[in-house]
């Protein structure tokens, strides 16, 4: 990648002053949006002009509209041929793909651009049919898109605008070789936009290979915690940890609690429900329709506590989520930042609490140093005023509650049959098995 040769356009502090179609500006006004976030103000003028963009910033900084508004503006008024989309957004997880689709839909509708989401866990036949009917924008996880290309259902040679969102997460999940193969198939010389919280060696290789003289912008150079986020290490005894968890879970407000394994998520969820806390589990052992329904219950307030594995750390957005609790500390500082990134989004405040047993102190201290975080530390126990002051903890009611399990649509049997016929979910002969989260 050569050094920058063309000066970047200056930031524009008002959406109305940007060169976007009038229906798009009207849609922004209807959503009550007039002032862009910093990453939008800096990158949009350049992206609208067709420049390649490299955006660096933590989740929740406004990246989706930063690339989404530019993408929609550049293809507005065009029509895709069957199976040949005009724009592609690659993301690491199913949840993030759906979140991007939901965020862009009102703006796409305004300029009559057709979106489709391509992820695993859903009917590959329906997704192929959707693209074959003609869709200008495909929002996809790498694994499922590769499957559709193998089927001959989609070609990328007409893709003139390509976005990689959360590129560092795709690198962490091992998908960069697959992403590289996909990018090699898009229209040569097209516009590329890459957004990532960090620019490690793998992501930097992508930048150098696929971006041409990009405009670079960094919202958060350290990719760490923002000033609106508080970090607490709460030291607990082995015997008192579960009671502390129950009291924190009974707090007023929505909470995500992270555990290391899916069976631990199910077990803790049952314990919370039996103690009167409205909780649900989210992990890779659930079907995609179940995962979607669980997130809907959490967003709608039917569930107060989401007990999740790291599948939920990568991509989901919940408005007004003010606390993340690490029941099991992550092993990697990037995972810590991704988990914490579920709160304090878009300028809101939030708290990240990590429960630490005596045998975990050394590794958690190393984790904080690697993440560039200096946390508040305290020794706490259930029922103590200090725990209440930090987390809002209170004694659970003890009256068991029942949360209706996420309903699986009637079509799921057909989808499962479709997956069996397509071989989805099974490793293919001569090809490495893809990680489930990308499909």
Image (cartoon, grey):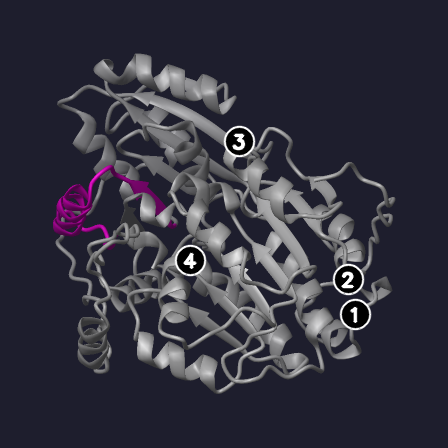
Asked if residue 268 lies left or right of residue 389, the reply is: left
21 to 342, vertically: above or below: below
Number of numbered labels in the structure image = 4
Query: Of the residues under marks 4 and 2, which one precedes in the sequence?
Result: 2
* Residue sticking out furthest to the front: 430
* Any part of residue 317 in sight: yes
Q: Nearer the viewer, mark 4 or mark 2?
A: 4
Query: Of the residues under marks 3 and 2, which one precedes in the sequence?
Result: 2
Q: CA distance from mark 1 to mark 2?
A: 8 Å
Q: CA distance from mark 1 to mark 3?
A: 35 Å
Query: Of the residues under marks 4 and 1, which one precedes in the sequence?
Result: 1
Query: Alpha-carbon neighbours of circle 4 within 10 Å: few (<14), some, or many (≥20)?
Result: many
* 262 drawn magenta: yes
Tag 1 and tag 2, C-beta contact below 8 Å: yes
Q: Residue at x 18, y 32 (%)?
A: 243
Q: CA distance from mark 3 to mark 2?
A: 28 Å
Question: Badge 2 is on which residue?
Answer: 48
């Amino acid at each position: 990648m050569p050094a920058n040769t063309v000066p970047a356009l200056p930031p524009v502090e008002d959406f109305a002053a940007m060169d976007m179609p009038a229906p798009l500006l009207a849609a922004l006004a209807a959503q009550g949006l007039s002032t862009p976030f910093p990453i939008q103000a800096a990158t949009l003028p350049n992206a609208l002009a067709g420049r390649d963009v490299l955006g660096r910033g933590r989740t929740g900084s406004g990246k989706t509209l930063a690339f989404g508004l530019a993408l929609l503006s550049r293809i507005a008024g065009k029509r895709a041929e069957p199976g040949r989309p005009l724009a592609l957004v690659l993301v690491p997880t199913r949840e993030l793909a759906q979140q991007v689709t939901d965020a862009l839909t009102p703006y796409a509708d305004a300029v009559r651009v057709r979106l489709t989401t391509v992820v695993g866990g859903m009917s590959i036949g329906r997704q192929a049919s959707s693209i074959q009917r003609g869709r200008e924008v495909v929002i996809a996880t790498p694994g499922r898109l590769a499957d559709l290309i193998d089927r001959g259902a989609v070609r990328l040679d007409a893709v003139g605008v390509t976005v990689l969102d959360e590129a560092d997460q795709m690198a962490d999940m091992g998908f960069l070789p697959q992403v590289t193969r996909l990018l090699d198939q898009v229209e040569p010389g097209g516009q590329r936009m890459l957004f990532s919280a960090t620019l490690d060696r793998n992501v930097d290789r992508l930048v150098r290979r696929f971006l041409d003289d990009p405009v670079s912008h960094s919202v958060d150079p350290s990719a760490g915690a923002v000033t609106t986020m508080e970090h607490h290490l709460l030291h607990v005894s082995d015997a008192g940890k579960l009671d502390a968890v129950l009291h924190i879970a009974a707090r007023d407000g929505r909470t995500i609690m992270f555990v290391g394994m899916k069976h631990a998520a199910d077990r803790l969820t049952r314990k919370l429900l039996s103690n009167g806390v409205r909780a649900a589990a989210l992990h890779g052992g659930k079907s995609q329709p179940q995962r979607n329904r669980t997130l809907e219950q959490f967003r709608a307030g039917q569930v107060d506590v989401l007990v999740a594995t790291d599948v939920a750390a990568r991509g989901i957005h919940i408005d007004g989520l003010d606390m993340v609790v690490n029941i099991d500390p992550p092993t990697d500082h990037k995972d810590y930042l991704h988990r914490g990134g579920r709160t304090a989004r878009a300028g809101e405040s939030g708290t990240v609490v990590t429960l630490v047993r005596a045998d975990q102190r050394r590794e958690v201290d190393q984790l904080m140093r690697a993440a560039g975080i200096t946390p508040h530390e305290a020794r706490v126990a259930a029922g103590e005023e200090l725990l209440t002051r930090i987390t809002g903890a209170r004694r659970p009611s003890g009256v068991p509650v029942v949360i209706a399990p996420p309903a699986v649509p009637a079509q799921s049997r057909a989808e499962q049959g479709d997956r069996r016929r397509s071989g989805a979910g099974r490793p293919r002969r001569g090809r490495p098995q893809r990680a489930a989260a990308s499909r």
